[in-house]
Image: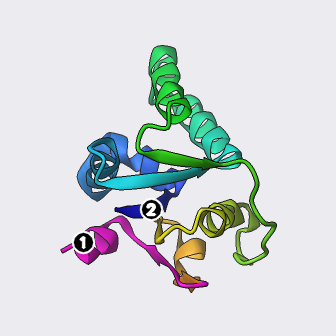
Amino acid sequence: MKKVVIDTNVFVSSFFGGNPRQVIDLWKSGKITLCISRDIVDEYIEVLARLGLVEEHDLKELLDLFAKGFHCIFTHKTPELKVVKEDPDDDKFIECAVSLSADCIISGDKALLAVKDYMGIKIYTPRAFLDSLV
């Protein structure tokens, strides 16, 4: 089973369908394992709440899934890396991937996608990731 880090933009875009939703459905069905860190969960929650995409009970349900380890693994400690020069805030996704030996990162972020590969960890768009599974 592939271990993946999912960028916030993919997580948020999944609410609108398309390839991002297919990626999240793979996680929900247990076909991939989501790798997360505190910084990533905090950003998911902050962005989803700010955009008004989820009600408070939905946020609680999502947090419960993470807390119960629902097809996910959590790292408490990540290395401090400086990889994404154009957007250092995106380093948290690479740090999590390195910490948990993830297979890949799935993102729609141009700065993160420009890295392409870090220490053997591929960085895919949602479509490219889905195509890689075939």
Residue 13 in percent (x, y) is at 39, 49
In the picture, the quarter occupied by the N terminus is: bottom left
Is 18 situated above or below 97?
above
Residue at screen point 35% across, 65% down: 126
Residue 85 location (% of width, % of height)? 74, 78
The residue tagged with tag 1: helix, strand or loop?
Answer: loop
**Can you identify the residue that label 1 sits on?**
133
Magenta residues, start to end: 119-134
Left or right of residue 59: residue 84: right
Using residue 105 as the reference point, say whether residue 126 is left or right of it.
left
* Quarter of the rendering containing residue 16: top left
Looking at the image, which residue is at 78% across and 72% down?
81
Q: Nearer the viewer, mark 1 or mark 2?
A: 2
Quadrant in which the C terminus is drawn = bottom left
* For residue 121, side relative to residue 42 (left or right): left
- Mark 2 crowdedness (10 Å alpha carbons): few <14, some 14-19, many ≥20: many
Front residue of this view, candidates 21 and 5: 5
Proximity of marks 1 and 2: CB atoms separated by less than 8 Å: no
The answer to whether 39 appears left or right of 97 in the picture is right
Q: Nearer the viewer, residue 60 or 11?
A: 60
User: Residue 30, image x and y in percent?
Assistant: 30, 47
Which mark identifies residue 90? none
Tell which residue pokes out farthest to the left in this image.
134
Q: Is residue 129 magenta?
A: yes
Q: Identify whether 45 is placed above or below 59.
A: below
Q: In which image quadrant can residue 133 be found?
A: bottom left
Q: Earlier in the sequence, mark 1 or mark 2?
A: 2
Q: Residue at x 27, y 58 (%)?
A: 19
Q: Amino acid at mark 2?
A: Lys
Q: Which mark is residue 3?
A: 2
Which residue is painted at 79% across and 75% down in the image?
82
